[in-house]
Amino acid sequence: MSDTKKYLVGMFDDDDVLLHAVKDVRNAGYEITDAFTPFPVHGLEHAMGLEPTRIHTAGFFFGATGLTVALSMITFINKFNYPTDYGGKPNFGLLAYVPITFEHTVLFSAIGMTVSFYYLCKLWPGKKPKIIDERTTDHLFALTFELDSTKDANYVNAVSELLKKEGAIEVYQKEV
Amino acid sequence: MNTYVFDSGTKKNIFIAFGIGVLLLILGVLFFGNSESHSNHATATHGQAVEAKAVTAEPAAAEGHGHAAPTLKMTVIANIYNIFYFGFYIALAALFFLAATNIAWGGWQIQIQKIPLAMASTIVVFLVCLLVMFLFFNHDIFHWTHEELYIKGSKTFDETLNTKRDFLNMTTFWSFYVIIAGSCLALTYKWWNTLTTMDSNPSRKLFSTSRVIAATTIVLISFVINTFATWLWSMSIQPHWYSTMFTWNTMASAAVTMLSIVILFIHYLKGKGYLPKVNDNHKHDVAKLMFAISVFWCYTWFAQYMLIWYANIPEETEYFRLRRNVDNYGILFHGAFFFNFVLPFFILMTRNSKRSKNVTIVAAIIIILGQFAAFFLMNCPALLPKGGFGLISFGLFLMIGSIFVYLTLAVLAKVKDLASTTHPYVNESYHHHI
């Protein structure tokens, strides 16, 4: 199929070994496509040189949206659309709006961040997962290198040698 | 460099701060005399307002004292009392920090835990200062201590206070002073003893002991010290009013101030070359707690306000009538909200700002000033209904604040092992990474 890609995969059985391997491979000048681990490895995102996530910025703006929606909606209802007298309190009682506004802010930022997280990870309903190696969901760690047309046999050999030297228990090529 | 040396340069700076405080106090006293002569007229009309209020049976604690306008004596007493109470609470919050981090198996704070320990030791001084205030100025601070309020049939009889007399009486007051002071001293001594012994002679048994002390500290602070100290020493200044959020709010105020002072001390000690292995990650954690407790403070502060606003019961709204109106404390009241919530919330929001030295110092100073105002608003408006936050407050704040810093650093200099290098969890602190 046309949308499959070819990968060089190095399997590791220890997270410390993986962490050192990532550092050394990157120092040697090879670009790692991705790493797959059965659990979050502390410091791996720094070692991989990934950009820090911007999802909390998105969360701030989702929250601001929630705040605006709650305030404008409740003001519209209480002040203009259906003003009711509750114990002589003002119709535009900003203090009474605070709890609902707070809830809306939290709700919007939580749902917004969840949805954007799913979108960024490409996890939408009906998505068919591409799993490099099933063992990465259980006990092994994988480093993958995408093999496009620019990567020749020399590259594959060099990276395989390096991975084996770093303690990879298995190195193979796979098309998914 | 593992033992702090209290050098003369620092001492000189503290003395200068103390001197500025004295200067501000003197200026405040001089300025106070001037402004009072102008407000004689206002005093007279205010006296009539008190009469009118007595008819409508609106309780106003301070006005019941017969002080129509704040006198110089009252202003100074209220401010001093407020700052002693503030200092007591900061020391108590430091004790709570030690206990809470220890009971949660915390590892990151091990290197900096001698700072809250030294701060907690100053509780001795503040307890003595409060005792002096209670002994000599009891009738000035606490309206409910006047005997004539409880004579049935007399003009001054106060029915509300009479029903509260089972709790609000001198026996309860002094019993709880003894209990609170006793448990504070015992806990401080125990913490000091355990943590300093652990420096010279570490053992697993001592570590288990410290966890038992931590559990005891949390229970005592939650159910005895914090609760009854706020009720008897702060809330009873305005004895007709009560709120269940008040104790929370006080502790949140104290805790966020304590953390701000801790981060200032960390920056100071790092600047002097101590605490070599404390890095951005530890400061990040302290700043996170500052951010979190600022939000928590605002939550309790707002909840207290909104419940009273919504219920609209006169004896409860009286509390905020004294504080929120623009002619007395309105600016301070809303300013405290901005200083304690809005500014820290936006300043400390991002990861980078929590890790930056300058930003956390600015946030800490903002929070300390804001919480000083918050404590003033808890204790003083009932005593000074016409306003009294000014040069005198800041002068006394600087004076007692510099004494507090001096004492803390002097105690810190007595600690042999500043970074707790023999604590069983210190490795976790070295490798703390977030």
Image (cartoon, helix red, strand yellow):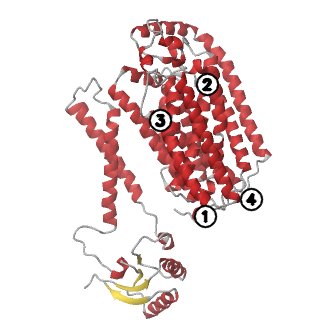
Quadrant of the rendered structure where residue B137 is? top right
Please name the amino acid that badge 1 sits on: Tyr
Q: Marks 2/4: CA distance?
A: 43 Å
| On screen, residue B364 above or below B432 | above
* Marks 3 and 4 close (CB-CB < 8 Å): no
Quadrant of the rendered structure where residue A172 is? bottom left
Place of residue B71 in the rendered image (x, y in percent of width and height, measured from the top left):
61, 15
Q: Chain of mark 1?
A: B
Q: Which residue is mark 3?
A: B247
| Mark identifier at residue B1 | 4
Judging depth in this view, the residue of B379 and A30 nearest the camera is: B379
| On screen, residue A51 above or below B398 | below
Assign a secondary structure to mark 3. helix
Dots 2 and 4 on the same chain: yes
Assign a secondary structure to mark 2. helix
Please name the amino acid that badge 4 sits on: Met
Place of residue B419 in the rendered image (x, y in percent of width and height, measured from the top left):
66, 57
* Quadrant occupied by the N terminus of chain A: bottom left
Q: Which residue is mark 1?
A: B430
- Name the N-terminal-most of marks 3 and 2: 2
Determine crowd level at label 2: few under 14, some 14-19, many 20+ residues with C-alpha closer than 10 A: some
Please name the amino acid that badge 3 sits on: Thr
Q: Which residue is mark 2?
A: B134
Residue at the image point whose x is 35% and y is 33% from the top: A95
Q: Chain of mark 3?
A: B
